[in-house]
Image (cartoon, rainbow, N blue to C red):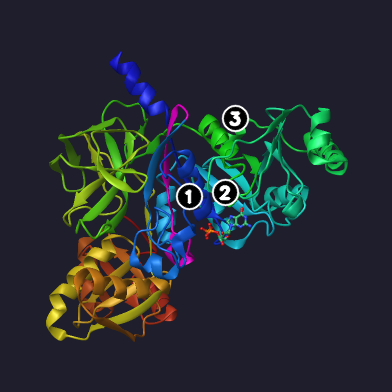
Amino acid sequence: MAEQTFLNEINKRKTFAIISHPDAGKTTITEKVLLFGKALQKAGTVKGRGSNQHAKSDWMEMEKERGISVTTSVMQFPYQDKLVNLLDTPGHEDFSEDTYRTLTAVDSCLMVIDAAKGVEDRTRKLMEVTRLRDTPIITFMNKLDRDIRDPMELLDEVETELNIACAPITWPIGCGKAFKGVFHIHRNEAILYQSGQGHTIQDARVIPGLDNPELDKAIGDELVEILREELELVVGASHEFDQNLFDKGELTPVFFGTALGNFGVDHMLDGLTQWSPSPMPRQTDERVVEATDEKFSGFVFKIQANMDPKHRDRIAFVRIVSGQYTQGMKLNHVRLGKSISISDAVTFMAGDRERAANAYAGDIIGLHNHGTIQIGDTFTQGEKLKFTGIPNFAPELFRRIRLKDPLKQKQLLKGLVQLSEEGAVQVFRPFINNDLIVGAVGVLQFDVVVQRLKSEYNVDAIYESINVATARWVSCKDGKKLDEFKRKAEANLALDGGENLSYIAPTMVNLSLAQERYPDIEFHQTREH
Ligand code: GDP
């Protein structure tokens, strides 16, 4: 019986993230999804531009000011007989590293496309990332209340540009001012749209059957004729949903609707909860770990400092890969070889932090981090395992950071090291001087760092330009050769926030020369924690 409950709990979990190009409607659809999950009473205005009602996933000051979502948050809610975990990802491309790592912690993705625009740049890149693990993809064609592109053409574009077969599950009836709803191909019924109901769950009118004369009356002769013609064509020319191909990331079910009008989101959620996989196995250095393995295991994909001003602490987000978390259990922090007692992990019920009594494979729990946990760390119930494939990317932009008040050097260093633990920026301390160099993948991260240093660590810092082109993490199997390298290349060496040896190159040419001169030294562009 207990065994059965355990398996049921795991099987009912669906953990996903949304990928999209900025402005396609990710925040809006998140709100509506939470509305269906009964996690929000009423959908607020998106990101509160100008108002104070923010989507619950947006936490920090920066986000409020700029209307961008910087942090990754986790929202859990029940939907029908399933329990859904939605992992929010930052929309801005300067935070793409965070997004990449979050995608290692989900089992499926929802791809939101602005149907007036089609496949855009960032969606292309994110799809490439999902390909690394063949993550199953569900597609939502958004903004049907606007004049969109020809739906057939949209599917073609997804198929050719993203190299994934499309299986339309619903089909739009008109668009823009003439948007009447969708025809649900699988349920063989038309579902009619009412405008102006975006903030609530609609009691939509449903008309069964494509040849139902009621449909002619409801949407008019012209649209009904187009619909019947299109559907005949679509059903003949497009793919049918195939669970197996979906599981392999080779075919995506496609839904049409409007997030703003809260129409079609529920059809998508029905499909997602029905078809997307329950918690999937993950690879370690030793073996593959199945979600249904009895013993707890999980990995850290994200660290967030000072998430909630009321709780001045750092939270390490752990994706549970197998087993079950119970309050007070002992876990092995594998990298440190230390056993710790976890008494107060947090769960993420739609953005509110609560004490988690129980959590299962597929869930995310937050561990309080007092500086010992790093991104990529594995926790188990004793076994020595290390989950693989959680990368850190070498930064491409560099600045020297300097204090306005030189007495706060210690605070500055502490802040930088803690912020670099989150993985968004790297801090480097050269061997030969007292500089502090901040490296980032995107330029916006520099602003975030200065702002957070001020609000969370009470230090005023400014940047100066510095002559650094790139950085590499270095390692060498031969200890003697490494020592020699350390001596000879000292002027270019530094330690990062996690005390890892790094090579700071003023130019790309300098880097290639160093690589030639020291063939036994490995220069890494990514660092697996
Ligand atoms: P994100 O950047 O992907 O999170 O996109 P948002 O959810 O912030 O949406 C970007 C803009 O598109 C906002 O002004 C939304 O109000 C608008 N939007 C989102 N969904 C729809 C929709 O279905 N129809 C229309 N007309 N606008 C939408």
Q: Is residue 230 in view?
A: yes
Sequence-wise first label, 1 or 2? 1
Residue 528: % across, % down:
34, 54
Does the residue at mark 1 contact the one at mark 3 (Cβ under 8 Å)? no
Residue that label 3 marks: 243
In the rendered image, the vertical position of residue 510 relative to residue 153, given as above or below: below
Q: Is residue 247 in view?
A: no
* Magenta segment boundaries in residue numbering: 80-96
Residue that label 2 marks: 198
Q: Tell me the element at label 2.
A: loop
Q: Quadrant of residue 456?
A: bottom left
Q: Quadrant of residue 406?
A: bottom left
Does the residue at mark 1 contact the one at mark 2 (Cβ under 8 Å)? yes
- Estimate the spatial distance between the alpha carbons at disc 1 and disc 2, rounded to whole Å: 8 Å
| Labels 1, 3: front one | 1
Sequence-wise first label, 1 or 3? 1
